[in-house]
Image (cartoon, rainbow, N blue to C red):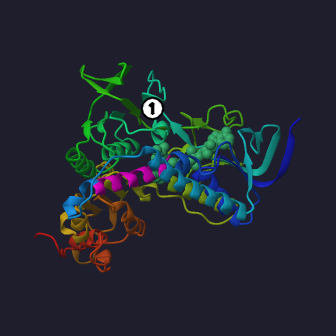
């Protein structure tokens, strides 16, 4: 007979970005919360995703700066990568954030339960011999790396992002299967660390969800950096060749490398957790929800990578907060998923918010577009980075014949990930180019890219050829 602990308002299964954000907000709103986690609170993002990859990317940037000092008149030499040193730095960053998160959760009196949880009824989660009962249950078990049918991940020569983050050496060479965000970020890191890298992507472009113009700029920059890519190319198979792997591509071509990184996407963690038995509707492993993250079972909500939609930590945060506020009786607004900022932290970075040109065409929206070259931005020239800012706005609707609301902002260049926060405000506030053109951006900063692109779109370009 299982023990029962029945005094919770909310029982949350999974302590990643979605689950812990829900716990923090619900506790803030006076709810009694149990947060169940089988591994480490913080989940994929903190331990196997956003944070460790960005630490590697920062180490990669330091390596490039050491290598390229001469271009700035600084005598420096790049002597190589000390992988244990890189891991020590990365792990220190993760550890510090992990400790901070644990103490924040404790400060809000959230009951942490460590163990493997299973949903056993619409209001109960079992962990070992204990059943945690809540008036409401939030499913937040996240996602895991996928592979292709028949492609076995051995963790040695054929690896996924979890293995890549723990790799004890810089590979001499690597083939990366998948040119999405994760594949592109590892390509960028390993190239900066000195590896020969080739990305194999079935679709016609790298970062295929981005505006095509951004993908093309990234491809050009990667070509200059010596990162190879095979676009529109189907992967056929991989064989151990004794010293590494031989990757076969459609058309009979092969690529030899030390290892193959499989970065073909992530799938939901829902199998065997009792969801369907409790009556929750699941499709291809994803828990189905409405725009308020409600499942078909009135006492169960779901958030994060477990539900369809963008697999991003900040989306998980937003969904977790939305559920907590809804359950506390506050008025909540559904998330506009087009308005979620997206960043690929490679060198150069790719950042965007809103719709792409292809989406505008698909939806039949008449738009005006403007591309502002990064070469017109003083700070970007100082940084010696390449790229552009592209704006998409409704063709009409502004004063004096200027375009209507800004519908898409697409940036490529070093550090542009930081700029998309402003883009996010512009898009979500449905700002007009005319309005943004009045706002003063500090000089010389990369933020002027945003300011000047809007000046140009409002018909009064400053540092731009007529
Ligand atoms: C390499 C990589 C890089 C990434 N970079 C970024 C980035 O830069 N920016 C960004 O926004 N996103 C990034 N992401 C995506 C981001 O990590 C995810 O979107 C985010 O972690 C999803 O949060 P979640 O809470 O839905 O799931 P998760 O973070 O996966 O958390 C789910 C949690 O549930 C726990 N769990 C699962 N089953 C059970 C069970 N039965 N019982 C108890 N606990 C359970 C797991 O242990 C885990 O801790 C990256 C992902 C990867 C893999």
Q: Quick check: 156 left or right of 411?
A: right
Magenta-colored stretch includes residue 173: no
Q: Quadrant of the C terminus?
A: bottom left
Residue 355 showing in the rendered view: no
Residue at image location 31% in from the left, 80% down from the top: 440
Q: Which residue is mark 1?
A: 159
**Of the pair 220 and 328, the residue shown nearer to us:** 220
Q: Residue 422 at what x, y percent from top left?
A: 38, 68
Magenta region, residue range: 49-66
Q: Quick check: 227 left or right of 12?
A: left
Number of marks in picture: 1
Q: Residue 192 at what x, y percent from top left?
A: 31, 47
**Of the pair 410 and 152, the residue shown nearer to us:** 152
Magenta segment's dominant SS is: helix
**Of the pair 386 and 326, the residue shown nearer to us:** 386
Q: Quick check: 236 left or right of 273?
A: left
Element under disc 1: strand
Does residue 228 sit above or below 80 in this rendering?
A: above
Residue at image location 53% in from the left, 33% down from the top: 284
**Of the pair 324 and 387, the residue shown nearer to us:** 387
To which quarter of the image does residue 429 belong?
bottom left
């Amino acid at each position: 007979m299982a023990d029962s602990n029945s005094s919770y308002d909310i029982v949350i299964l999974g302590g990643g970005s979605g689950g812990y954000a829900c716990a923090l907000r619900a506790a803030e709103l006076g709810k009694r919360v149990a947060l169940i986690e089988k591994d480490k609170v913080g989940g994929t993002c903190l331990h196997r995703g956003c944070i460790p990859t960005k630490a590697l990317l920062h180490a990669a940037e330091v390596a490039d700066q050491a290598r390229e000092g001469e271009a700035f008149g600084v005598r420096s030499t790049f002597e190589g990568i000390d992988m244990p040193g890189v891991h020590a730095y990365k792990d220190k960053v993760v550890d510090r954030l992990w400790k901070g998160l644990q103490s924040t959760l404790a400060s809000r009196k959230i009951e942490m339960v460590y163990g493997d949880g299973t949903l056993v009824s619409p209001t109960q989660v079992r962990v070992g011999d204990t059943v945690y009962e809540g008036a409401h249950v939030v499913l937040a078990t996240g996602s895991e790396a996928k592979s292709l049918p028949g492609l076995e991940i051995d963790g040695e020569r054929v690896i996924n992002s979890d293995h890549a983050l723990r790799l004890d050496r810089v590979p001499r060479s690597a083939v990366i299967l998948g040119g999405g965000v994760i594949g592109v970020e590892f390509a960028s890191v390993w190239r900066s660390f000195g590896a020969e890298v080739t990305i194999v992507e079935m679709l016609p472009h790298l970062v295929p969800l981005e505006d095509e113009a951004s993908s093309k700029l990234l491809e050009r920059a990667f070509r200059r950096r010596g990162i190879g890519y095979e676009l529109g190319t189907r992967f056929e198979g991989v064989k151990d060749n004794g010293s590494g792997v031989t990757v076969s591509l459609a058309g009979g071509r092969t690529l030899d490398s030390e290892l193959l990184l499989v970065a073909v996407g992530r799938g939901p963690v829902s199998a065997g957790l009792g969801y369907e038995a409790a009556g929750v509707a699941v499709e291809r492993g994803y828990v189905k929800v409405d725009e308020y993250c409600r499942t078909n079972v009135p006492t169960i909500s779901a958030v994060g990578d477990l539900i369809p939609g963008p697999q991003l930590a900040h989306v998980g945060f937003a969904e977790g907060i939305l559920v907590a506020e809804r359950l506390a009786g506050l008025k909540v607004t559904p998330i506009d998923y087009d308005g979620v900022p997206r960043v690929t932290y490679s060198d150069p970075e790719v950042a965007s918010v809103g719709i792409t040109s292809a989406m505008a065409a698909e939806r039949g929206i008449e738009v005006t577009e403007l591309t502002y070259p990064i070469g017109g931005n003083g700070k970007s020239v100082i940084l010696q980075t390449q790229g552009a800012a592209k704006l998409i706005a409704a063709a009409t609707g502004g004063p004096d014949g200027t375009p209507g609301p800004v519908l898409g902002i697409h940036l490529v260049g070093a550090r542009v990930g930081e700029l998309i926060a402003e883009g996010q405000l512009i898009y979500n506030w449905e700002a007009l180019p005319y309005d943004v053109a009045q706002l003063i951006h500090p000089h010389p900063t990369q933020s002027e890219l945003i300011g000047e692109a809007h000046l140009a779109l409002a018909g009064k370009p400053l540092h731009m050829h007529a």
